[in-house]
Amino acid sequence: MSERAKMTLKLKIWRQENARSKGRMTDYTLSGVSPDMSFLEMLDLLNEQLISQDKDPVSFDHDCREGICGMCSLVINGQAHGPEALTTTCQLHMRKFKSGDTLFIEPFRAKAFPVLKDLMVDRAAFDEIIAAGGFIDIATGSAPDANAIPVSKINADLAMDAAACIGCGACVASCKNASAMLFVSAKVAHLSHLPQGQVEADKRILSMVAKMDALGFGNCTNEAECQAVCPKGISISNIARLNRQYLRAALLSEESESMDCLEEGSH
């Protein structure tokens, strides 16, 4: 590719030494950027330049670079994962921008996602929510044949759609309340649509929502920013379904507790 096809970009990147230090936006000018580079490859190029100048490279999360793991979470020009819909940061290519553009690059910001360094945040809160109930704990025996348990195509499709969530946290970063409802509802839905997940459905919902609230995530106010930035297109219909299931589970739990109290009082 000729040099005339390469781009020069002005970068304003959040730099923060550690979780306790005060961060700041730092300006960089980067030339030689190919339109065919991914966004992370562009950051690699910047870091090569910084290292050659004996400067501290920019820290950012990445792993698969194939849009699967959700580690590449950045806010680019105010949008989680950048300007292209249904695309993770690692799958965003520089041809989406023009030479001379100024790019603002920041970490995901939420109380439950503290910044560790530069563009890296701690998303262990999502792991804690999963540990609270995002699994099947009943004895299911050996793996059955694929067609041994009847599942309607509608439920199978809904479960697979919800299971597409990669836990990147874009929903939290884009929500003005830093709500994790889209993430939690997706994790609940992909289990509760299947027969194996229905046995513990009520317990799962109550536990995961309680953990979500305890970790400091905000409430959902139904503005759908989460759905708009989700790189996997997770629908807010999952949130509506979670709300209905949560109300049912909470009422049944209160009724069960009341019955237990009556039984204890009768002895």
Image (cartoon, grey):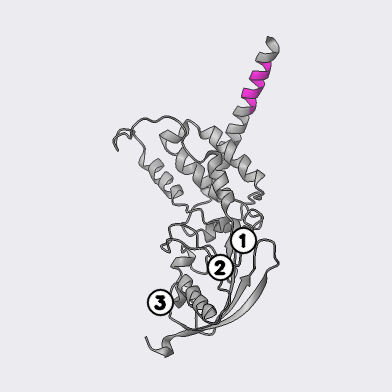
Location of residue 144 by image quarter: top left
Helix, strand or loop at mark 3: loop
Q: Which residues are magenta?
A: 254-262
Q: Would you identify the image quadrant in which residue 207 lies?
A: top right
Main SS of the magenta part reads helix
Question: Along the line of sight, which residue is nearer the eye, 69 or 227?
Answer: 69
Viewport quadrant of the C terminus? top right
Q: Residue at x 45, y 43 (%)?
A: 190
Tell me: residue 197, above or below residue 7: above
- As shown in the figure, which amino acid type bears the numbered disc 3? Asp
N-term-proximal mark, 3 vs 2: 3
For the residues labelled 3 and 1, the Cα–Cα distance comes to 30 Å
Question: Do labels 1 and 2 touch, CB within 8 Å?
Answer: yes
Residue 222 % position (x, y)? 61, 52
The amino acid on which the numbered mark 2 sits, given as a three-letter code, is Ser
Nearest to viewer (mark 3 / mark 1):
1
Using the numbered discs, state the Cα–Cα distance from disc 3 to disc 2 in whole angstroms: 22 Å
Residue 209 inside the magenta-drawn segment: no
Sequence-wise, the earlier of marks 3 and 1 is 3
The residue under label 1 is 116
Q: Residue at x 68, y 69 (%)?
A: 23
- Residue 1, given in percent of the width and then of the height, sits at 37, 85
- Which residue is painted at 64% across and 19% down in the image? 259
Q: Quadrant of residue 171?
A: bottom right
Q: Is residue 240 visible?
A: no
Q: Position of residue 39 (x, y in %)?
A: 48, 72
User: What residue is shown with label 2?
Assistant: 59
Give the label, 3 or 2, closer to the camera: 2
Q: Which mark is residue 36?
A: 3
